[in-house]
Image (cartoon, helix red, strand yellow):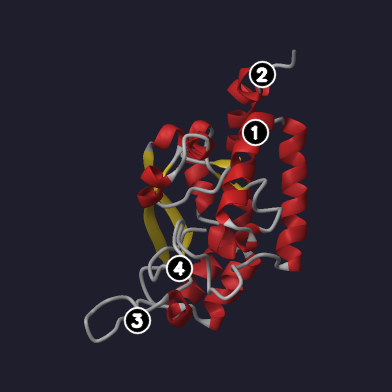
């Protein structure tokens, strides 16, 4: 009988060591790029340059996730944020398509909130909506990229996306993580699955229409 991934050395210790080493190295290498992106965000989208939001991590523990802003704060006459497609600028679309908006999440990895590879950290409001099976996605640290992200990203229906997250939890290994990293590079270059069909980003879990403030991806 094969061991469960979390009982292996990589699952218990190696994954975290790999994450910390690679994320620290990437932060050093990407520092000039991050400074340049921060400056451009300040010019084209305004301040603050970082998008901060509470997300559930491993075992549902709440942490603050960091990304570069890709949307404006444009509001309607009632002071409510406009829909995503009206706040997402061309520059913001470029950041999302190139995944440059994800670079600040390297800080979350160094802090131990996230992993390089794992289910994407979604919204806190989704927690009570998951089935018992879907909730198993929180048995591991959330990732910058993951099995679902290299298999359609935001273009995949929610049920399939969450099922892939759980599948990853049960099949995590060092070689599998390296393969996902490689496929992530291909996905970013091809700009696949940036948004669900008919939506600027991704419709909210359990809803037919897009959420105006979801930023769920």
Q: Residues under labels 4 and 1: Cα distance?
A: 28 Å
Dot 2 or dot 3: first in sequence order is: 2
Q: Residue at x 58, y 30 (%)?
A: 16
User: Which quadrant of the figure has residue 53?
Assistant: bottom left
Say which of 159 and 112 sits in front: 159
Find out whether the residues at labels 1 and 3 contact each other: C-beta distance under 8 Å: no
* Residue depth check, mark 2 versus mark 1: number of the one nearer the observer: 2
Nearer-N-terminus badge (1/3): 1
Kindly identify which residue carries mark 2. 8
**Pick the front one: 160 or 93:** 160
Residue bearing mark 3: 74
Tell me whether the residue at label 2 lies in contact with that at label 1, contact meaning CB atoms closer than 8 angstroms.
Answer: no
Relative side of 52 to 195, left or right: left
What residue sits right under mark 4 in the picture? Answer: 69
- 127 lies left or right of 195: left
Q: Percent position (x, y) of residue 84?
A: 44, 75
Tag 2 near tag 4, CB within 8 Å: no
Residue that sits furthest to the bottom in the current view: 77
Q: CA–CA distance between discs 1 and 3?
A: 40 Å
Q: Name the residue rendered at 57%, 44% in the picture.
A: 119
194 vs 46, nearest the viewer: 194
Question: Image check: 4 left or right of 62?
Answer: right
Which type of secondary structure does the marked residue at label 4 adopt?
Answer: loop
Q: Which residue is mark 1?
A: 18
Q: CA distance from mark 2 to mark 1?
A: 14 Å
């Amino acid at each position: 009988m094969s061991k469960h991934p979390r009982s292996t050395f990589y699952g218990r210790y190696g994954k975290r060591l790999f994450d910390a080493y690679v994320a620290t190295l990437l932060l050093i290498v990407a520092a000039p790029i991050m400074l340049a992106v921060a400056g451009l965000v300040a010019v084209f989208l305004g301040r603050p340059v970082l998008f901060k939001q509470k997300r559930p991590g491993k075992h549902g523990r709440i942490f603050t996730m960091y990304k570069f802003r890709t949307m404006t704060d444009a509001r309607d006459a009632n002071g409510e944020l406009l829909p995503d497609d009206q706040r997402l600028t061309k520059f913001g679309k470029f950041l999302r398509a190139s995944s440059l908006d994800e670079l600040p999440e390297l800080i979350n990895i160094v802090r131990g909130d996230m992993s390089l590879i794992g289910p994407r950290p979604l919204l806190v409001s989704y927690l009570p909506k998951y089935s018992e099976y879907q909730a198993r996605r929180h048995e591991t640290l959330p990732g910058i990229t993951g099995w679902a992200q290299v298999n359609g990203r935001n273009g995949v229906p929610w049920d399939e996306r969450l099922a892939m997250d759980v599948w990853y939890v049960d099949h995590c290994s060092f070689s599998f993580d390296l393969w996902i990293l490689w496929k992530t590079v291909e996905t970013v270059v091809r700009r696949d699955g940036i948004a669900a069909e008919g939506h600027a980003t991704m419709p909210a879990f359990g809803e037919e229409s897009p959420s105006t403030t979801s930023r769920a991806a």
